[in-house]
Structure formats: C-alpha cells, structure tokens
Image: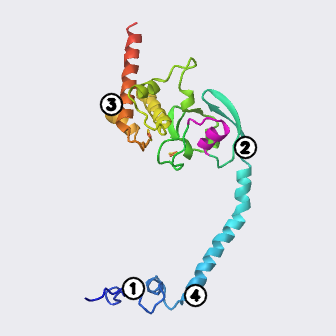
Amino acid sequence: MAERSSTIDPSAHPGAPRADDAPWEGLLANLPGRGNVSRRQFIKGVIATGASVSAFAYFAGPAATSARASVPRLVSINVNGQTRRVDVLPQETLAMTLRYKLGLTGTKLGCDRAECGACTVMIDGVAHYSCSTLTQRVRAREVVTVEGLESADGTLHPVQQAFIDELGPQCGFCTPGQVMAAAALLEANPNPTREEARRAMSGNLCRCGAYDHYLNGVMRAAANGQAVAEEVSNG
Ligand code: FES
Ligand code: FES
C-alpha cells in the first residue's frame, strides 16, 4: 500500500514550504516586498519592531500612570438608595466593588467578561453587566442590586415572588442576574409580550436551562402587576 506522503507538492502549492526549507521559508517567500530579504534580516526586523513597541510602552507608561493617578480613589456611589463611600481603583469593575468592598454578594460573577449576565444590576433603571462597568463611571448614578429590590418590610419584589411561584431557580447561580434583567424590563415595559420578554432576557444565560421557568416568571409578574394596576384604577 502506498504510504501517505507528508511532503507538500510545491508545484501544486507555490510558496508552500519545501522539505529542505525552514518551516517559515515558504511563507516568507509570499510576503509582499520579500525580494532578497534573508531569514536573518526578517528576524532582525521582527526584533526591532518588538523593541519599538516596548520603547513606546516605556515612554508612554509614566503619562498613563499619572493619568490614572489623577482619578480620585475615594468616591461616593449610590447603591440601593444609600450613599456609600468606597476606595475604588481606576480600573475596578462595579462587580468587584459591590462584592468585595460593599459586601453585596448577591451580584454573582460568572464569566467576568460580559457574556453570561450573572452580574446584572440596574443602573438608573437599566440592566447592565456590572463586570464590564467601571465603578468610577457610576458615581452620579443610581445602582440597584438584587439586595435592594425587596421592600423595607421584607416583601419580595413581584419578579422575585413570581420566580419562586414558577420554580424558576434550579441551582440558583444565575437567578440574581435573571431577577435584575426582568425587573429592569418590567420597569421599562410593564406589559411585555412573551417574545419581548424572551428578547429582554436573552443576555442572561442559565446553565441549568431553566429559561422557560424564568420566562413564565416574567409573564406572571407582568400579569400580577397589571391586575394590581387595574385594581387601583377601579378604586
Ligand atoms: S459575570 Fe458579567 S456577564 Fe458574566
Ligand atoms: S438556575 Fe442554575 S444556572 Fe440558572
């Protein structure tokens, strides 16, 4: 049986590496302006480019550092209706501040890169990923976390109650983010269609796959809200 050759036929693939080439020779041959540049010259060029980048970082570094240093670190932020003074690094995310400086661990960290929604909080009534929001950017704004949703007498927010009634949470890790996304939706649109609710909740992943339960919860909370509104308007 003929052995499978691992050699690429150069006539079929011009510029492909030959058996006697260094692995990158074929690639170098195709570089624009390659001309008679030797491998040694090419490598020297790469090293020179790296040195320029490093030099730029070296010289720009102090300027960047002083810009960061000019940001005041002791800031006041409004969280759940209270003004909290907190020492915040310039690059610190709101999720880190909430969890590790203010003790509000209801806000979960899943991916920490704006993909899962576990860290969702409301900022000025709109759902935001707190893992991708700098705390320094929320100084003049109102932040609400899952701890701030229930009333002073301990009555749960309608979304929280509806999620319980619909058996939404499975492991519960994504639940605070789901609650905040749903609460923000109903604040903006108290009577959404199921499709609107599905779209509004699409930024919140659930590893347990409890999506329909959460969606049922959103629709139940909306229906309960409508019933209460009608009761009030009928006197
Ligand atoms: S932790 Fe923020 S989106 Fe995943
Ligand atoms: S309930 Fe487990 S991740 Fe959503």
Q: Which residue type does callout 1 highlight?
A: Ala
The mark that comes first in sequence, 2 or 3, is: 2
- For marks 2 and 1, the one nearer the N-term is 1
* Residue drawn 38% across the image and 42% down it: 209
Q: Image point 40% across, 29% down: which residue?
A: 189
Task: Reply yes or no: does residue 198 show up in magenta.
Answer: no
Label annotation for residue 73: 2
Q: State whether label 3 is within 8 Å of ligand 2.
A: no
- Percent from the top left, x then y, of residue 111? 51, 49
Between disc 3 and disc 4, whose residue precedes? Answer: 4
Q: Secondary structure at mark 4?
A: helix
Asked if the residues shown at circle 2 and circle 4 are in contact, with their CB atoms under 8 angstroms apart, the answer is no
Label 1 residue SS: loop
Residue 37 coordinates in the image, percent (x, y): 53, 89
* Side of 233 where 43 appears, left or right: right
Viewer-side residue, 59 vs 130? 130
Name the amino acid type tagged 3.
Answer: Thr
Q: CA distance from mark 1 to mark 3?
A: 57 Å
Marker disc for residue 16: 1
